[in-house]
Image (tube, helix red, strand yellow):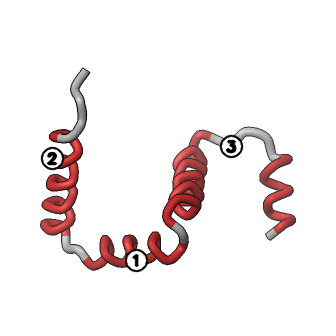
Amino acid sequence: MQRYQERRRNAGPAPRSGLFIETRRETTRLLVETLGDDQLRALREHGAALDTDAAVAYTLARLDTYLTNTDAT
């Protein structure tokens, strides 16, 4: 693992196709740092168990709550 990290540091900028991968890795790192491994794993399991309709309904409900409680400027 250490060799891989060294090669990544010395490789220079990631190609455009790697932008998604790098963004996902950084997001995962931030989530682990904020929530911890166990909470993140539980949330991912919860999301994986949802079918498409339930996932959309869950997302819309959370988005509606967020938008209702956010000051529009």
In the image, 66: left or right of 17? left
Looking at the picture, how far across and down is residue 7, in whole percent? 84, 55
Residue at image position (52%, 59%) is 34
Nearest to the observer: residue 1 or residue 64: 64
Q: Which residue is mark 3?
A: 14
Q: Tell me which label, 2 or 1, sits earlier in the chain.
A: 1
Q: Secondary structure at mark 2?
A: helix
- Near mark 3 (Cα within 10 A), the count class, few <14, some 14-19 or many ≥20, is few
Residue at image position (21%, 56%) is 59
Q: Which residue is mark 1?
A: 42
Q: Secondary structure at mark 3?
A: loop
Q: Which mark is residue 64?
A: 2
Which three-letter amino acid code belongs to the residue tagged 3? Answer: Ala
In the image, 22: left or right of 45? right
Which three-letter amino acid code belongs to the residue tagged 2? Answer: Asp
In the image, 55: left or right of 39? left
Q: Quadrant of residue 42?
A: bottom left
Residue at image position (23%, 74%) is 50
Nearest to the observer: residue 33 or residue 17: 33
Looking at the picture, how far across and down is residue 3, in whole percent? 86, 65
Nearest to the observer: residue 64 or residue 53: 64
